[in-house]
Image (spheres, rainbow, N blue to C red):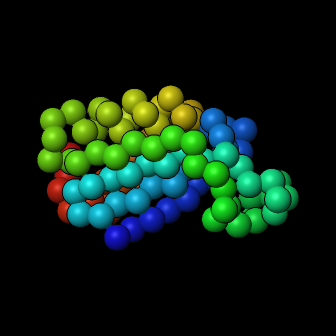
Amino acid sequence: MATKTWKLGELSRGGVITVNVKGSKVTVIAKDWDTTNGYSRNKSQANAKEWDRLEVNLNNNGAESALDNYLFDLTTSYYTDNIMEWIKSKVTKHF
């Protein structure tokens, strides 16, 4: 399983996006910035509160579009592209 967290702050709704990839299952978790540790990007966001998530199986038709649309709703097109490229580098089944 591969996991990565993007701490985007004001460039993302909520500020934090975590992606888990396990085989052909991808989970994108939108979180609120955990301000108890401060506002710096180098602070841990492990306790950030989850407010939304999307789980997709890449074997289903439209999985890439669902991921892309969900990410674009959360953040800018630049970070959507970066996150999608990271996902593609980690999945066992390519889009």
Res 17 seen here: yes
- Residue 95 pos. (x, y %): 20, 46
How many marks the image carries: the answer is 0
Residue 73 screen position, x and y as percent: 50, 29
Residue ID at (71%, 49%): 33
- Whether residue 94 is situated above or below residue 63 in the rendered picture: below
Seen from the viewer's position, the closer of residues 62 and 49 is 49
Q: Is 22 located above or below residue 64 in the figure?
A: below
Rendered residue at 72%/38% (across/down): 10
Residue 64's image quarter? top left
**Residue closer to the observer: 50 or 37:** 50
Q: Is residue 3 left or right of residue 95?
A: right
Please name the residue shown 74% across and 54% down the image: 34
The quarter of the picture where the N terminus appears is bottom left
View extreme (bottom): residue: 1
| x, y percent for residue 37 | 81, 63
Residue 5 in which image quadrant: bottom right
Residue at image point 40% right, 59% down: 20
Q: Is residue 22 left or right of residue 59?
A: right
Q: Is residue 15 left or right of residue 25?
A: right
Whether residue 41 sits left or right of residue 20 in the image: it is right
Q: Nearer the viewer, residue 48 or 41?
A: 48
Q: Please say whether residue 78 is visible from this viewpoint.
A: no
Percent coordinates x, y for residue 22 in the rendering: 30, 64
